Amino acid sequence: MKATNPRTGECDHEFAESTPEDVASVSARLRAMQPEWEARGAAGRGAILCAFADALERHAGAIVAALAIDTGRSAIARVELDTIVRRLRGWSARAAELFAALPGEATQSATPGILIEPRWSAYPLFGAIAPWNFPLLLSHIDAIPALAAGCAALVKPSEVTPRFVAPLSAALAEVPELPLAYVLGGAGTGEALVAHADYVCFTGSTATGRKVALAAAARLIPVNLELGGKDPLIVAASADPVDAARIALRASVVATGQACQSIERVYVARAIAEPFLAELVRAANAVELAWPDPGRGHLGPFIFPAQADKVAAQIADARSQGAQVLAGGEVETLGGGKYLRPTVLTGVTADMAVMRDETFGPVIPVIPFDTIDEAVALANAGEFGLSAAVVAGTVEEAAEIGAQLDAGAISLQDGALTSMVGDATNHSRKGSGLGPSRMGDEGLLRFLRRQALLRQTGAPAPIAAFAEDHRREEHHR
Ligand code: NAD
């Protein structure tokens, strides 16, 4: 397969796609390693996960350099690596606490004579399928707690961003006890992974998530889906319009808007719409592209060139229906990469693609509202329910509005906070996901199955106890 360099637009990287046979043999190897891994206990596994964190730090230069080519970003590439190093250490410590707190004592059943002893065991082979927008972080966000829980882990990063996997594998080779492996490729490799894993976490688009859920259903294995979003921001009349505009801008355009929790729709109270838009446009125009120097500026290129076309099509569609572009609006090709400055749109309506479909670009469509009820109804419309945000005069007022929103995580007096917080247990709603929370303790506990050992301490019932005649009645008497 080939991968495109987002800064040059050139197909400059070739790699071998893992075949279904490769996936089968890697799965068998990991499966064989898993019992010993689980038997090490939380502390034993934690020590090895921390050794992997140390190895990642030793190889940080090469991993970040490759990831920077994959994503066209430099500082964010470093943040991705630092985050997984921190998560490896953090989950190792938390796993020891969680395992120590698991009920292990036998308890008396309500059925006389029976003691119930709980046992916990991990799903043997965990599988992750990741997208291209934060390739390193999203390849590991579920795999780390799965490993800490005692699973072996097979990870398939996106074929759009494959370069970081080779230096990452060099770090992994220094920790041979860790039952973790990577396979590279597209849909076929992902399908093979679902065919072998015992538990799958998928992060990606809603359309692909549906396919993965169906494949998992056919095998009767659990699947967690972390899918697309169309996060709304409500700015109440009591909010400071300048502060709210700055929040809206940052939460919409960081990482060129290629984040699931980006703000993609803004509903602002009509009373403050004018000063809000004035500051939003000013701040949008002050944002700099990270070009030609990837180490300067705010917004890098689109990682996946086709994404730039999709975003441009949404903007063109909105314009053709009467939307006005107050800032940005044109995809620029610079040095072969595709860039978009923060794009502020007004005159948009709820039925336009830019208000309805995921954009995944630095686009901020703004609709004024008259009442909070109207804003809540607009925010709750549509197929997604990932996260949302509210800015108001007080955090209490923001919380009151936020509680009415149909989404898994609500940022109050800020936006897109789930990009900075790892421990906010929440469940994505509607087309944005399925299954337990990846954040908080549930992020690990979901990988454990509870087994009940039923100890008979009395006399086992004779068959007469189940006879279909009066003797049974007598026995019970
Ligand atoms: P995508 O759905 O196109 O691909 C995701 C992964 O699925 C890739 O690794 C791909 O190779 C694989 N895949 C494709 N077809 C498959 C199949 N039939 N079976 C198994 N695997 C298959 O998504 P993308 O374009 O890479 O990523 C962008 C999307 O990810 C956006 O919708 C974004 O919102 C979403 N996302 C969600 C979260 C979240 O936490 N909710 C986080 C980041 C990104």
Image: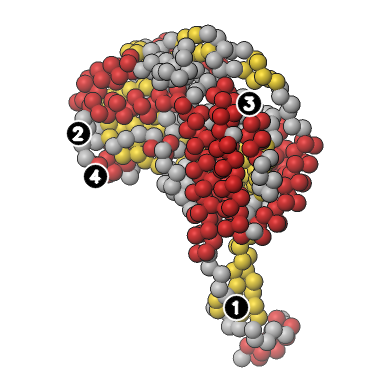
Where does label 2 land, which residue? 238
Q: Which residue is mark 4?
A: 396
The disc, 2 or 3, on the residue closer to the chain's N-terminal end is: 3
Label 4, secondary structure: give it: helix
Crowd class of label 1 (few under 14; some 14 to 19; many from 20; radius 10 Å): many
Residue 351 percent location from the top left of the image? 41, 23
Label annotation for residue 333: none
Residue 290 placement: quadrant:
top left
Please tell me how crowded label 4 is: few (under 14), some (14-19), or many (20+) other residues with Cα within 10 Å: few
Sequence order check: which comes first, mark 3 or mark 4?
A: 3
Instruction: Identify which residue is drawn at 31% across, 32% down.
Output: 234
Which residue does the numbered mark 1 point to in the structure image? 115
Q: Viewer-proximal residue, 277 or 64? A: 64
Queried on whether the Cβ of the residue with tag 2 lies below 8 angstroms from ligand 1, the answer reads no
Q: Disc 3 residue type?
A: Arg
User: Residue at position x 61%, y 54% from top?
Assistant: 45
Q: CA distance from mark 2 to mark 1?
A: 59 Å
Can residue 95 be seen at all in this image of the molecule? yes
